Image (spheres, helix red, strand yellow):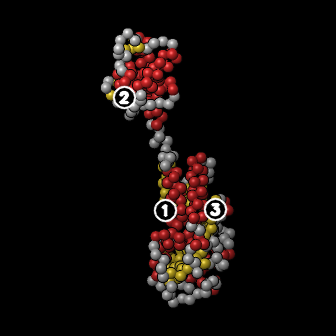
Amino acid sequence: MSIRAFKCGCSFIEFTGALVLRERSGDYLQRLRGFYFVASTGSVHKAAAHMCRNASTISYQIRCLEEELGIELFDRTTKKMVLNEAGKKLLNWTTEVFLLFEKMNFDVSSYKNIDQIKIRIACTTSFAHLVAGAISNFHENNFSVSIYQCGCIQALSALHDNKVDIVTGGGLELPVEENMDVLFQARQLLVLSTDSPWAVSIQPSLEELRRLPLIGFNVEDFTVSSVASQERLNLKKLYEYNSNISTNSYYMMLDFVRKKIGAAIFDELCFRDIRTNMSIDGLAVYSLDHVLPRNDYGILVSKHKRNDTQINKLIKNIKQHVAEQIFETPFVDLPVL
């Protein structure tokens, strides 16, 4: 009997003189596998015990195989299951067939890591917690995803320089040609310490905002568009003339607010992230929806990757996941005065 060993990481191991063949679907392959173990052990009962089957099931498989081939495979003149010449020939073929299946699987799966899909994402801090679930689900299919957390301008720059494939974020007034797929909008909020020395009305006017010492985002992080709306320009001017301290971190902005150095303006997605990670006790929050523009949040895709099947699948996942997150915890539930 000729049995060639196959050593390419497959699951065949020695077991009482026989190779352990991986179970395959299909009646004919099941019968061949049963035949193999009967031939290797010389006993229907031993083969059945090894395969965790009933002896009657294995006997039935052997009968079906012989009927299908139209020939006996064992010498029935002895008590043991001894192969005849036809049986020996079939045993060699059975071994070859199952080894070939294993070799095929190994050969194909060896490309799994070589051809692994790699997707690069730039994500703004406030948006990160919304997309994490979608990326986790997508990653289960063994795709490689690299995520860079950064500011809006840095993310856009990385996209233009082809360093990332997707940007998820917002807060910018973008040129029309950027083609952002907007998923939702977030209101601007004014945040003050409850015992701050600056009093404002429940709906602060633009004039009231101009009198406040502001702690805000860097001016250059506001717009890259030459056709910014008047509201966006109003916001930019507020920071140009009133900024006491500027930073690209809304966590630092909040620390300065607590120290009564000034007031902060950021959108409700940023506030939602803050609320998730730290206490908001001692803060007064005012909606500025009546005087300042809402921030668009969405997805930007590299023009070289807009037809990429896997990237479009990930984008679909992100859209669905974000919609569910916004529905479960809508922004209107935030404690806005």
Q: Give x and y (percent) for residue 32.
A: 46, 23
What residue is shown with label 1?
149
Numbered mark located on residue 226 in the image: none
Residue in the image at 43% along x and 24% along y: 56
**Residue situated in front as seen by the camera: 4 or 262:** 4
Residue type at numbered disc 2? Ala
Residue in the image at 57% along x and 64% along y: 328
**How many C-alpha atoms fall within 10 Å of the one at disc 2: few (<14), some, or many (≥20)?**
few
Q: Give the mark nearest the N terminus, 1 or 3.
A: 1
In the rendered image, the quadrant that contains the C terminus is: bottom right
Residue in the image at 45% along x and 73% along y: 278
Look at the numbered disc 2 and give the secondary structure of its residue.
helix
Residue 147 drawn above or below residue 67: below
Residue type at numbered disc 3? Val
Q: Give x and y (percent) for residue 180.
A: 63, 60
Q: Give the mark nearest the N terminus, 1 or 2.
A: 2
Cα distance in 3D space between marks 3 and 2: 62 Å
Look at the numbered disc 3 and give the secondary structure of its residue.
strand
Look at the numbered disc 1 and give the secondary structure of its residue.
strand
Residue 103 drawn above or below residue 183: above
**How many C-alpha atoms fall within 10 Å of the one at disc 3: few (<14), some, or many (≥20)?**
some
What residue is shown with label 3?
182
Does residue 256 appear to the left or right of 330 in the view shown? left
What residue is shown with label 2?
49
**How many C-alpha atoms fall within 10 Å of the one at disc 1: few (<14), some, or many (≥20)?**
some
Q: Give x and y (percent) for residue 211.
A: 58, 87
Residue type at numbered disc 1? Gln
Residue 136 drawn above or below residue 336: above
